[in-house]
C-alpha cells in the first residue's frame, strides 16, 4: 500500500507534527497492519478545511454538513481520503495525532470495500467512538492478514430451509473443504460472512467464506476479500450437469443473481468454480422452473452425485493453488 499526502499545512494548523508524511503513514500501517505492505493499492490522503469537506460531503453523500473523513475509489487501484483536521480537533477524541491515523484507517476500510453503514457491532450503531475505532482496526487487521492469501467464497442461502438444495452447492463445497482441514466457521459480522481459516505451511492463509447476506447480496461479503488475495467463487450452475464441475476465469453464467451481485461489487477478476446441478430436462420440467428446482432439497441420489463432484473439485482446487 502506497500513500501520498497533500495539503499538510492544513494539518499543521491543528497538529504541529512535522513527521506526518507518506513515510510516517506507511510506517504506521506496517507496524499496526504488517501485511499492508503487500496490498497493491495507492492512497491519496488530502487535508481540507471545514468548508471544503462540507462541499465534498454534499457532492458525495448529499449531506450539506462538515464531517471528519470521506473516502472513495477513483479506480480499483487508487483511492482518496479527505480529512478535516479542524473537525477532528474539535471532537471529543481529537487531542492526539493518533486520531488522524484512525481516520486514515477508517478511510482505507472504505477503499478496500468495507462499507460499514453504522453496523460494526452487528445491526446496532456503536455509541462509544473508542469501541468503534477498535472494531474498525480489528476489521482492517483481519482483511490485511489475507493480503497474499487464497479466499474461496461459496455462494448459498442461510437457513435450514435451504439445506442441501442445488442453490447451496457453494456452501456445500466450503463445508466439505473446511471438514477436510478440520476447521470450523466463525461469524464475522463486520465482513458479512462466516469464515473458516487454515494457516498453510508456506505461510499463506486459506480463508473459506460463506456469506451471511443471502444469495442475492453475496457481493457484500466477497468485496472484503477481492482486493487482498486471490478470490475464487464457488457456486451452482444449471449449465453444467449434476456430478460435473468446471473451473473458469472471467466466464460467468448468464443468469445467477448471486454471481451478478459479486460482479457488481468487485468486477469479473475472480476465478469461478462452477458446480453442476443440472439433473435432466424432465426433472426440471417436473418443477416447472429452474428457480423452484434450485430451492428444493435434493434427493439422496442427487446429493451423492454432487458430493462426488465437490470432492473432485476440492482435489483440483488444492492442486491448482499448491496447497499440500
Image (cartoon, helix red, strand yellow):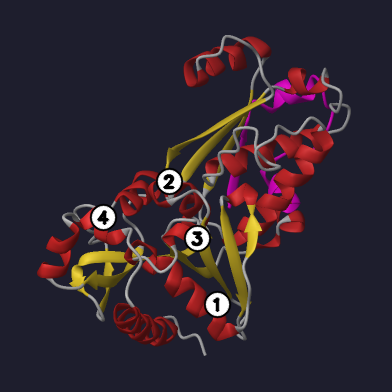
42 w.r.t. 239: above or below: above
Disc 3 to disc 4, C-alpha distance: 16 Å
Q: Position of residue 140 (x, y in %)?
A: 66, 51
The answer to whether the residues at label 1 and label 2 have Cβ atoms under 8 Å apart is no
| Mark linked to residue 160 | 3
Q: Which residues are magenta?
A: 1-28
Mark 3 or mark 4, earlier in chain: 3
Residue depicted at 51% across the width and 74% down the height: 175
Disc 1/disc 4 C-alpha distance (Å): 29 Å
User: In front here: 306 or 82?
Assistant: 306
Query: Is-magenta flag for residue 238?
Result: no
- Reading the image, the residue beneath label 4 is 292
Q: Is residue 204 left or right of residue 300?
A: right
Between marks 3 and 1, how big is the CA–CA gap?
Answer: 19 Å
Label 1, on which residue? 178
Q: Earlier in the sequence, mark 1 or mark 2?
A: 1
The one of 88 and 122 positioned closer to us in this rendering: 122
Residue that badge 2 annotates: 217
Q: Describe the element under mark 3 as helix, strand or loop.
A: helix
x and y, in percent, of residue 137 in the image: 73, 48
Q: Residue at x 62, y 71 (%)?
A: 197
Amino acid at each position: 500500500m502506497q500513500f501520498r499526502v497533500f495539503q499538510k499545512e492544513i494539518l499543521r494548523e491543528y497538529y504541529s507534527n512535522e513527521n506526518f508524511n507518506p513515510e510516517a503513514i506507511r510506517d504506521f500501517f506496517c507496524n499496526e497492519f504488517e501485511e499492508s505492505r503487500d496490498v497493491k493499492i495507492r492512497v491519496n490522503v488530502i487535508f481540507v478545511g471545514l468548508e471544503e469537506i462540507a462541499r465534498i460531503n454534499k457532492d458525495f453523500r448529499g449531506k450539506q454538513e462538515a464531517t471528519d473523513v470521506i473516502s472513495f475509489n477513483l479506480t480499483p487501484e487508487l483511492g482518496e481520503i479527505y480529512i478535516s483536521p479542524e473537525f477532528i480537533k474539535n471532537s471529543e477524541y481529537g487531542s492526539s495525532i493518533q486520531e488522524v491515523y484512525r481516520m486514515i484507517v477508517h478511510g482505507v476500510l472504505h477503499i478496500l470495500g468495507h462499507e460499514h453503514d453504522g453496523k460494526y457491532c452487528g445491526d446496532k450503531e456503536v455509541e462509544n467512538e473508542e469501541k468503534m475505532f477498535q472494531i474498525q482496526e480489528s476489521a482492517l487487521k483481519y482483511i490485511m492478514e489475507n493480503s497474499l492469501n487464497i479466499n474461496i467464497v461459496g455462494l448459498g442461502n442461510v437457513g435450514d430451509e435451504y439445506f442441501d438444495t442445488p442453490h447451496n452447492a457453494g456452501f456445500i463445497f466450503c463445508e466439505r473443504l473446511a471438514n477436510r482441514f478440520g476447521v470450523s466457521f466463525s461469524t464475522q459480522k463486520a465482513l458479512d460472512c462466516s469464515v473458516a481459516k487454515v494457516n498453510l505451511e508456506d505461510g499463506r492463509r486459506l480463508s473459506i467464506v460463506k456469506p451471511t447476506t443471502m444469495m442475492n447480496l453475496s457481493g457484500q461479503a466477497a468485496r472484503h476479500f477481492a482486493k487482498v488475495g486471490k478470490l475464487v467463487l464457488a457456486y451452482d450452475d444449471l449449465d453444467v450437469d449434476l456430478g460435473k464441475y468446471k473451473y473458469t476465469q472471467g466466464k460467468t453464467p448468464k443468469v445467477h443473481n448471486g454471481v451478478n451481485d459479486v460482479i457488481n461489487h468487485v468486477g469479473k477478476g475472480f476465478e469461478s468454480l462452477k458446480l453442476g446441478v443440472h439433473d435432466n430436462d424432465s426433472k426440471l420440467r417436473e418443477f416447472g422452473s429452474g428457480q423452484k428446482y434450485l430451492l428444493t432439497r435434493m434427493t439422496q441420489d442427487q446429493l451423492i452425485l454432487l458430493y462426488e463432484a465437490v470432492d473432485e473439485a476440492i482435489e483440483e482446487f488444492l492442486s491448482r493453488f499448491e496447497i499440500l
